[in-house]
Image: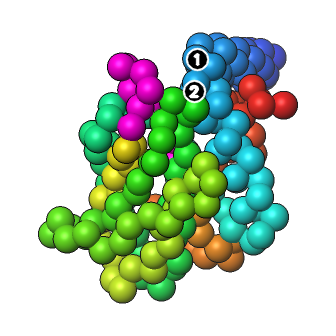
Amino acid sequence: MNFKHLVISGIALILGTAIVGNAIAQELTDDQKTVVCRLKTEVEQRKGNGQKLVFVPLLGQVRNQVSSPFRATLHPNVEYVFVATCDGNCQDLNLSLKDASGQEIAVSQKTGELASISFTPPSQGEYQISAKPGECKKAEGCNFGMGIFVPASANVPNASKIPAEIAQFRLCQ
């Protein structure tokens, strides 16, 4: 094998990834950018308070009074904090957490533009977290984003490999 070809291929792969990441980030609407920047701020604040993002942030769009559910396997004895925010078209974003049987076990607390739930599972299992706005000012709905945090020292076996810099967060610099 020719070492020169491997180096050139590696550089091309890195540049291609950077270009695609920038293209993805540049296609966001202003409302989506608002959500991404609010999430970035929250990630930075929580990092300073000894927490880490455990899964890649979720971004989505939802209509008035419509729930947008996500599922995650959570592990026992780890405090998870689910934090969600939405764009300026959204009022009263609510989060709810349900266990595998569909039983609601927690609802969000609000702090300004953020809704959050803190939860420590008693055992490993699949849980459903849902985001639901009370009202969206635009007919197409509201953009929202959610991050899931744990203590920095926590070992979460199914955690995402979070890059040092999340591509969409570059829009907020």
Indicate the quadrant where residue 19 lies: top right
Q: Looking at the image, what colour scheme do you see?
A: rainbow
Residue bounds of the magenta highlight: 135-148
Which corner quadrant holds the N terminus? top right
Across and down, in percent, residue 45 comes to 77, 58
Q: Is residue 31 left or right of residue 136?
A: right
Which corner quadrant holds the C terminus? top right
Closer to us: 85 or 80: 85
How far apart are labels 2 and 1 at the CA level? Answer: 5 Å
Residue 29's tag is: 1
Which residue is rendered at x = 39% and y = 43% of the image?
133
Which residue is rendered at x = 39% and y = 37% of the image?
135
Q: Amino acid at mark 1?
A: Thr
Across and down, in percent, residue 18 comes to 72, 21
In this view, 6 is above or below 54: above
Q: What residue is shown with label 2? A: 32
In this view, 78 is above or below 39: below
Which residue is rendered at x = 69% and y = 18% of the image?
22
Mark 1 is surrounded, within 10 Å at the Cα level, by few (under 14), some (14 to 19) or many (20 or more) other residues, namely few
Q: Main secondary structure of the magenta part?
A: strand
Q: Amino acid at mark 2?
A: Gln
Across and down, in percent, residue 57 comes to 55, 45
Residue 166 seen in the figure: no
Q: Are marks 2 and 1 in contact (CB under 8 Å)?
A: yes
Circle 1 SS class:
loop
Indicate the quadrant where residue 166 lies: top right
Closer to us: 64 or 83: 64
In this view, 79 is above or below 88: below
Which residue is rendered at x = 29% and y = 41% of the image?
65
Circle 2 SS class:
helix
Across and down, in percent, residue 13 comes to 68, 20
